[in-house]
Each structure stands twice: as C-alpha cells, then as structure tokens.
Amino acid sequence: MKNLKLGYNNLIDSATLSGGSWNASLPLANLQSRILSKVARATNALAASTLINIDLGGAKAVQAFGAIRTNISASGATYRLRGSNDNTFATSLYDSGTTSANAQTPDLILGLDSAVTARYWRLEIVDTSNVAGYVQIGRLFIGPALAPADNYSKGAEIGYQNNTAVSRSVGGVKYFDRKPGERVFSFKLDWMTEAEALGQTLELQKICGIDGEVLLVVDPSDTTYNQKRHFLGTLQQLSMIENPYLTNYQAAFNVVEVAA
C-alpha cells in the first residue's frame, strides 16, 4: 500500500491542448469543461488519434493525474503518460511506460510517487478492441497533490451520500424522486509536518474551497478497488488545521464525488 495523494489546483483549464484526431462536434477543448457528460471524442481508438499534448505554459509541479469518465475497454487497452520540459519528449522527467489500463476504467487516476516539475505532458491511449470504435474522455485533471509522509489514520470511512428526495401524501404514501448517490471518503491526517499543514493543506483549502476540484487517490498502488475509492471530487467542508503538539499538525477531510 502506498500513501494517499490528494490532488488539487487543477491546471487543465489554463493549459493548451493539442494533438490527436478529435470529433469536430466533441473537440479536445471539452476536456476543459467541468461537465463530465461534455466529452471529447477521438475519431478512432488508435494512438495517433487519442494522443493529447498538454502545455501548462511553464514548468509546474504535478503529482496527480486523471482522465475521468472514459469509455476505455475493461481489457486490452494501454496508456502512457509522460512529462518533460522538451515539447518533443526526446527526454522525459516522468514516463509511466506503456501500461495496461485494465484496472483504470472508467477513470484513469494516477498518483505519482513524487512531484514532477514539467511544462509539457503527453497522454497516449491505445484501445483497438474498443467496441465503440473510439475513445472518449469527460474531464482531465493535472496538478500538484497533498502527499503526506505519514498516511491517513485508522478510522477512515467510505460510503454513498443519498440524494433521493422523499415526499409523503396526505394518506402517508411515500413517493421517491430517485437520484444517484455520490461517494464520500472521510479521513484524517494526524501526523502532518509544518510544511504539509501550512505549505500544502492550508493552500489546498484556499485554492479549492468547497467548489474546486480535488483528485482522491487513496492508494496509488491499488489495482483491485481503485475504481471504488479513487475519484474526482470536491471538499464537503473545510476543517480547521489543529496544532496539538509543537511540530505536529492534524486535519480532517471529507471528499465528495463529482458524479455529473
């Protein structure tokens, strides 16, 4: 098990996207919309068509990456993510290598072991067995992450938040306006350093508030339940950062899923 990563400050909206071959009515620019159903769709599922170049406009720290709400096949697909300060990618500061995407559908979510400061990033997906004949993606996330040296404490919780409304007739009959639930993951970091608390957590709260996107990666090494507990979300509330001991800081987090 690897330590949790909580991505924040999504840089994708200010980035320049290029590459690949994309449907004119569902263009690459749709990846810069927070509406997940507003997808970008490649003309086919070959690497040349699904390639995405991301120019952040300058070298910036990245430790969390996500391609959200994809239609990548459950088996047979591969991905490769690279980061570089050379837009030809002749040399890379980060290279995932060609990796099976079997455990990364529908959400390809990665928590890098350490922050990589790079301007240019490239995502390549190959999914020639895709039954739809094309690859589509609902949203991209790329940004830094809160990456505590000491993992979250025991007692973390995960579950679904109910969104179904209930009304009752005069006679007592219940009527339900059923709506999909949203996952919530609650955890606490009890052993943060001063840098993690004031340099990262406080900054995360300032940038994200309760409306900014965060990318939850509970265990970057998990290939069994990653699709259950890794997701794009927002903070449900902002918790005070506690300082119970001189060099020790604590904070609680509630991350609620962005489901639409």
Image (cartoon, helix red, strand yellow):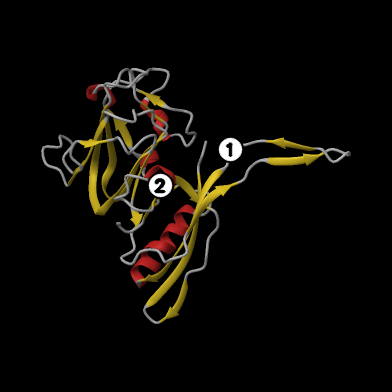
Total residue callouts: 2
| Marked residue nearer the N-terminal end (1 or 2) | 1
| Helix, strand or loop status at disc 1 | loop
Which residue of the protein is positioned furthest toward the left in this rendering?
90
Along the viewing direction, whichever of 235 and 97 lies nearer the viewer: 97
Judge the density around disc 2: few (<14), some (14-19), many (≥20) Cα neighbours within 10 Å.
many
Quarter of the image containing the N terminus? Answer: bottom left
Reply above or below: 35 against 8. above
Residue 163 at x, y percent in the picture: 63, 43
Q: Which amino acid does the dot numbered 1 rest on? A: Pro
Tell me the distance, in whole angstroms, between the alpha carbons under discs 1 and 2: 18 Å
Foreground pick, 225 / 31:
225
Query: Residue at label 2?
Result: 230
Quarter of the view holding residue 169 = top right
Task: Identify the element where label 2 is drawn.
Answer: loop
- Across and down, in percent, residue 140 comes to 37, 37
Residue 180: which numbered mark, if any?
Answer: 1
How far across and down, in percent of the image, does residue 223 sit?
A: 32, 45
Residue 255 in sight: no
